Image (cartoon, coloured by chain):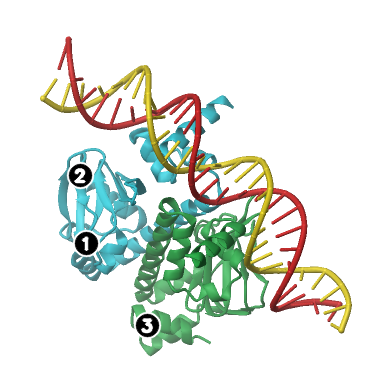
Chain colours: A green, B cyan, C yellow, D red
Amino acid sequence: MFEVLLGNINKKISLTEKEQELVKTFFIPKKLRRKQFLLQEGEVCQYTAFVEKGLLRSYNVDEKGHEHVLQFAVEDWWIADLYSFLTGEPSGYNIDALEDTELLLINGSSYEAMMEAVPKMERYFRILTQNSLVATQRRLSGNISLTAEENYKQLIAGNNTILQRVPQHMIASFLGIAPETLSRVRRQMTGK
Amino acid sequence: MFEVLLGNINKKISLTEKEQELVKTFFIPKKLRRKQFLLQEGEVCQYTAFVEKGLLRSYNVDEKGHEHVLQFAVEDWWIADLYSFLTGEPSGYNIDALEDTELLLINGSSYEAMMEAVPKMERYFRILTQNSLVATQRRLSGNISLTAEENYKQLIAGNNTILQRVPQHMIASFLGIAPETLSRVRRQMTGK
DNA sequence: GATTTTGCTTGATAAAAGTCAAGGCTTATT
DNA sequence: AATAAGCCTTGACTTTTATCAAGCAAAATC
């Protein structure tokens, strides 16, 4: 149940057996079937979720009804609407499962309490968040400086398992382009 | 010299007098004149910089010679190429001063040593990085789901001091649009 | 096994944004 | 004071991407 999470933590810091047992107590296991929501627009994001198994996405829906994927999360990743989680404001995002999924949830007060109880976890989350920030900055950077084709190539170069597990129109949505555009970009690329 | 930094830290955690004195020892003060570089493409980013006074930007230059601003940093903010700083890889970005600037620099080993010496700083950087991540995610989200005009309006709504201190073409570059486009967007907006 | 549903592609067209070039205004520089 | 550099705007045009509509194939549902 906690293998993946503890593995992830131990990649960044090292916990004693006792600390590991303590950490476990702050999490709530939860299973989601494909297409179920973890969070819906308008709700407050109560939990940060660690993915033990499966695949989820966070996305918003614009006035025209188009979905825009902010994040995919597979095994060994975290997902939440961090803004809503930290501020308690209602979220503008949805999070749903794209595959049957097993999660470990932690709420705001447990999050704080856990770092109180196991101060090393402060370091874990600091490193985690730093890595996440680096990844998000790189994506943003690509978005403001590269073409659709270049961004797609960069995504492929990252050799991401997500490409094989997610329908193409969601990749388009993640890249910030229309599904038709991604289809044409791909044709262009094979032609060359 | 350290007023702004210590003020910033004390907004997020609280340090004793002794801890404050200790923290100070890890930083190197540095002044930059307008147009001077803190980091140039190809170099490894050795420092994370806290801005006591002034204004900087980080940006990359694409094959066509166009600059793309990833970040502005005014007083009370941090700036670096976090990717290069953390990995030791050469940076693809430049950081330069847009105004005469006073910085407090900390290098990688001091960064680690400081958290060792004052464990509360781990918490400070965790919170700092979380906030930075939230801001970057919101910007990315706008970039993939909004039009140029909507993104500009959102920037104005944020009531950011940067708008008054930076030439318009850099705002355009920050938004990921051509300077001519921003000019036209602004005309559109006043017309309505 | 038939029938929706979902996903991908393609073509025609429209809209958004980028590019190139010129002009004018203001601010630095000498 | 003259000159140069930087910045913003505007027009004409091109390129990129989005939109709308249709068709087909594969997968899911009944």
| Circles 2 and 1 in contact, beta carbons < 8 Å | no
Front residue of A79/B169: it is B169
Amino acid type at circle 2 is: Glu
Residue under label 2, please give it: B102
Check disc 1 and report its element: helix, strand or loop: loop
Whether residue A80 can be seen here: no
Q: Which mark is residue A10?
A: 3
Whether residue B122 can be seen here: yes
How packed mark 3 is, by other alpha carbons closer than 10 Å (few <14, some 14-19, many 20 or more), is some
Chain holding disc 1: B
Chain holding disc 2: B
Position of residue A67 in the picture relative to residue A111 (left or right): right
Front residue of B60/B109: it is B60
Tell me where residue A43 sits by quadrant. Answer: bottom right
Residue under label 1, please give it: B44
Amino acid type at circle 3 is: Asn
Q: Along the polypeptide, which appears first: circle 2 or circle 1?
A: 1
